[in-house]
Image (cartoon, grey):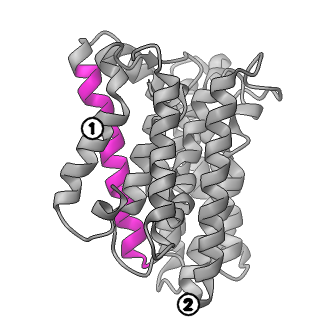
Amino acid sequence: MVFLFRDKSIANIFFLSVLSIVVHLHFFSSVPVVITDQHDGLISMVLTSYIAGQSQTVLFVLYHIVVLLQALRLNMVLNDQRMFHQYTYMVAMCYVLLSAILPQWCSISSALVSNSLLIWIFTKLCKLYNNPSPKTLLFNTGLIVGATILCYYPTAVLVLAVLFALTVVRPFRLAEWLILLMGTLLPFYFLFSWLFLSDRLAGYGNFLPRIRVGLPISHWDTDLVVSLAYLALLFLTGFYYWQVSMGRMGIQIRKNWGVMVVMLLIVLPVPFVFKNAGITASIMSLVPLATFSSNAFSGPKRLLFPNFLFWLAIGVIIYHNWHLV
């Protein structure tokens, strides 16, 4: 199966659609649920108002559309930035495949939707290196980050990711950091202005992230351990092949990979830091995880080991849904 996605062919979009349906066959028994929380942000409000009450068919189609569009967008961005030696659909395949590894990721949530904004922010950060007008780009990037936080509060960690990425990509200039922070704070300025003018400033706390350090689950079960073990195996394998190919990369490409490393380290603790985030919020890590893990499928010259990893993932998915069998 892996060889299908090693080519630059428009037919791979069809294969990705088939793969998405196959790994989520359990949706024919139980459609994806809509997970919302009134303290999640604006995305949660939209999901509660317009999506939660939709029919099962609409939820089924909507989940696949969101995952496929994010997978294709991430794949296109990484290939346009030449972060891989040849144009393939491996990242998109890995994104779709991993979306079914954890049962908590098989739902329509604010975290899933926010991945689209996460990919957008990464695209902006990749353009910072040798940009002729970095201040404009930095302000726009900060504006997107601020709007993203209002859309889904646990994405507040992206402020740290962007600041670290700025350190990786560009030499330190205080003016650029201030411009980035100004862009990030601008959406909150407009929000607090609206609250003040409408005499609702006392409720500003409802629009801020709620921090509570702790475990996102009350107990560990076998399903979660199996999924995390596979994700660790796939990531470490992909990381190894990424290290092997680092010597053939240019400076800008290395910096882009550095940004992705920083993003991974920043988003991984989200379920442990934010109140009511839970394992569902960990789907934010799917963007960097799929990026690095795709090296495990595209790195080896022979397909034996990549095919083993692919069918091992299918085995994990079947294990989670064995009750359907």
Residue 140 appears in the figure:
no
Residue at 42% across, 59% down: 91
Please identify, in this view, whether the residue under mark 2 or under mark 1 is nearer the observer. 2
Q: Eyeballing the image, is 95 above or below 46? A: below
Residue 120 located within the stretch drawn in magenta: no
Report the magenta residues as a range: 58-82
**Residue 287 place in picture, x, y as percent:** 51, 51
Residue at 32% across, 64% down: 3
**Side of 270 where 283 appears, left or right:** left
Residue 81 located within the stretch drawn in magenta: yes
**Residue 294 place in picture, x, y as percent:** 49, 61
According to the picture, the residue beneath numbered tag 1 turns out to be: 65
Of residue 177 and residue 232, the one placed in the foreground of this image is 232
Residue 247 appears in the figure:
yes
Count of numbered badges drawn on the protein: 2
Dot 2: element: helix
The quarter in which the N terminus is drawn is bottom left
**Side of 80 where 230 appears, left or right:** right
**Residue 314 place in picture, x, y as percent:** 44, 39
By secondary structure, the bulk of the magenta-drawn segment is best described as helix
**Side of 175 where 13 appears, left or right:** left
Q: Eyeballing the image, is 160 above or below 60? A: below
**Side of 14 where 273 appears, left or right:** right
The quarter in which the C terminus is drawn is top left
Of all residues, the one furthest to the right in this rendering is 213
According to the picture, the residue beneath numbered tag 2 turns out to be: 248
Q: CA distance from mark 2 to mark 1?
A: 35 Å
Dot 1: element: helix
Residue type (three-letter) at the residue carrying disc 1: Ile
Of residue 318 and residue 52, the one placed in the foreground of this image is 318
